Structures are given as C-alpha cells and as structure tokens.
Image (spheres, rainbow, N blue to C red):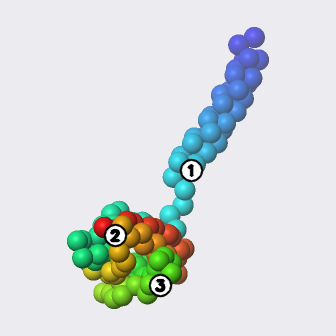
Amino acid sequence: MKRKYAGIILLIVVIFVVLSGILFYFYISVPFPPQPAYGIFIWDENCSSDGSVTMSIQNIGKNPVTGITCIQTAPSSDTACSPGFTNVNIAPGQTQIFSGMDKCSGLGLMFCKYELTPNGGRTIQTQLACS
C-alpha cells in the first residue's frame, strides 16, 4: 500500500514545486520591470531668484546618457532651453546636476514647462514655477 501512494505523493510534490516556481517568477518579474536601455528621471528642479533653472537628472537606463535634448514648451514666447544641457555624462544609476540650464522668464509667478529627451530614450515632461 505504501508504494502505491508514494508515486502519487511524489507527483503532487513535483506539481506543487513547479507551480510555486511559476508563481515566484511572476512575483519577482512584475515589481521589477526590465531596465530600459536609455532613460532619465528628474530628482530635483528649482529656480533661483533670477529665474535660473537647475535640475538634478538621474540615469535610470542601462547605458550612459551623453546628451539630453531640451525643448521649452511654455511659455510659448520662450521655446529655447539656453544654454540647455551641456557636458552631459551620466553613468547608469548616477545623478548629475545641471545649474543654470535655462532661464524661466516672465513677470510675477512664472510657469515653465520642458520636454527632455536623452539620446536614444523616451521624452519626459516637467514643469516648475519660478517667482
């Protein structure tokens, strides 16, 4: 009798182990999606009293970021990021601070919007208020 049930118990244990492995794989892969080849994240952005914009950018991709294209989308009267992002060299997982990458211009409370695109990566949008 014991031998008859041993095969069934072994089969149930194997099925349980396989199903546990599959569930563990999905549990691990969902919270940690694959890392993109090129990507950036804005850690901090602020304006000085004269409207100079400073941004802290982190590389969240697998490859170094060596260039960032910047377009100012608002206010519509000022569409250039000047001087923009110069001397960009951000290793994966590292952060670089860009002081004075633009000047948010206008009178009173100014809202400036930007689109930033790392070489080979997706565009991200950000906005900040300067006074």
Q: Which residue is mark 2?
A: 108
Q: Nearer the viewer, residue 112 or 92?
A: 112
> Residue 62, can we see it?
no
Residue at far front of view: 107
Q: Amino acid at mark 1?
A: Ser
Looking at the picture, how far across and down is residue 54, in whole percent?
Answer: 29, 73
Q: Residue at x 33, y 80 (%)?
A: 103
Q: Residues within 10 Å of mark 3 (few under 14, many from 20)?
A: few
In the picture provided, is 45 more to the left or to the right than 126?
left
Residue at far top of view: 1
Q: Amino acid at mark 3?
A: Ser
Q: Residues within 10 Å of mark 1 (few under 14, many from 20)?
A: few
Mark found first going from the N terminus, 2 or 3: 3
Q: Residue at x 67, y 36 (%)?
A: 19
Tell me the SS state at disc 1.
helix
Tell me the SS state at disc 2.
loop
The image quadrant where one finds the C terminus is bottom left
Q: Are marks 2 and 1 in contact (CB under 8 Å)?
A: no
Q: Which residue is mark 3?
A: 77
Q: Which residue is mark 1?
A: 29
Looking at the picture, how far across and down is residue 30, in whole percent?
Answer: 58, 48
Q: CA distance from mark 2 to mark 1?
A: 48 Å
